[in-house]
Image: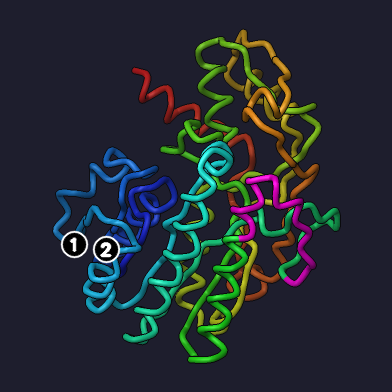
Amino acid sequence: MMKVLITGGAGFIGSHLSEKLLGQGHEVVVIDDLSTGKMENIATLLSNKKFQFVQDTVRNEQVMHLLISQVDMVYHLAAAVGVKLIVQSPVHTIETNIHGSEVVLDIANKFRKPVFIASTSEVYGKSDKMPFCEDDDTVFGATRFSRWSYACSKAIDEFLGQAYYSQYGLPVVMARLFNTVGPRQTGQYGMVVPRFVERALKDEPIEIYGDGKQCRCFGHVDDVTDALIALMREPRAYGQLFNIGNNQEISIEGLADFIIERTGSKSRKVFISYDEAYGKDFDDMRRRVPSLEKVHRVIGYQPKHRLDKIIDDVVADLRKKRS
């Protein structure tokens, strides 16, 4: 059994990972500043003697030094999340993502502790080569679009991870996550699935940004956290970057139609411009589909949850909260 530190562990993905690791008998320490994470996500874990919560930022080097020195491995999930937050708070995005990773990797290297770094499919940028493979070129938009600050900051995280592995031999695993969804996720920061489901359950208009023809793939948080755990147990994954998610593609308008049908909602679709949605110019990509060949080859990963199950789980979670 291990003792594991999860940065951003009170967030959506972090809370599921904490729950799963505790269920396997490990000790879990979570550090989260609660800027986007929530205590309600980990409320059921607080009574577990193998669980510890620390409210602080990963940029606090003194606290991180103490925590990392006492654990066996680190899952670094703390980051700015959600398109809306990223567009509205670009300084917070850059500082949190880059400096937080610098602190984690530097201290982990001092104690020789394996590190997982969560990256994002945003790093592929505006590339139109499908499906995305881990070694494909990235194509970022103009720097005047603040959304690309997130992609660039996570690309820097990947460069840092690769540098610590190649220069110091630190066991580092990196993964680009593709639209992870599931219970506990909130639509507060622009996440499209919970936002659509919340509107559908209230029979309110579902706002689709742009023309709705942009396509995405959605992975269940249960599949994703299984992959994170498996990768950190596999030495062949060290120094490597992996796509994790689902390759079942759907347009955003199609997603709205599917959710309306699945919930029996009376909601209607409303199309609004990016300018109206974000209050400024916004640069988007048309498709985002991952190749899962590499992660399947290394750990046998194959998503178990299809879109209908993913939506049903989100619907059940939000209905439970409403009741």
Which residues are the magenta region?
Answer: 135-152
**Which residue is drawn at the image coordinates 58% and 61% (left, top)?**
154
Marks 2 and 1: CB-CB under 8 Å?
yes
Is residue 149 rendered magenta in the image? Answer: yes
**Which residue is drawn at the image coordinates 64% and 46% (left, top)?**
147
Q: How is the image coloured?
A: rainbow
In the image, is 305 to the left or to the right of 47?
Answer: right
Q: Taking the image as drawn, is residue 1 in sight?
A: no
- Which residue corresponds to mark 1? 50
Residue 101: x and y, percent?
45, 68
Residue 39: x and y, percent?
27, 41
- Which residue corresponds to mark 2? 28
For mark 1, give the secondary structure: loop
Disc 2 versus disc 1: distance between alpha carbons? 6 Å
In terms of sequence position, does the residue under pointer 2 or pointer 1 come before the other?
2
Vertical comparison of 42 with 197: above or below: below
For mark 2, give the secondary structure: strand
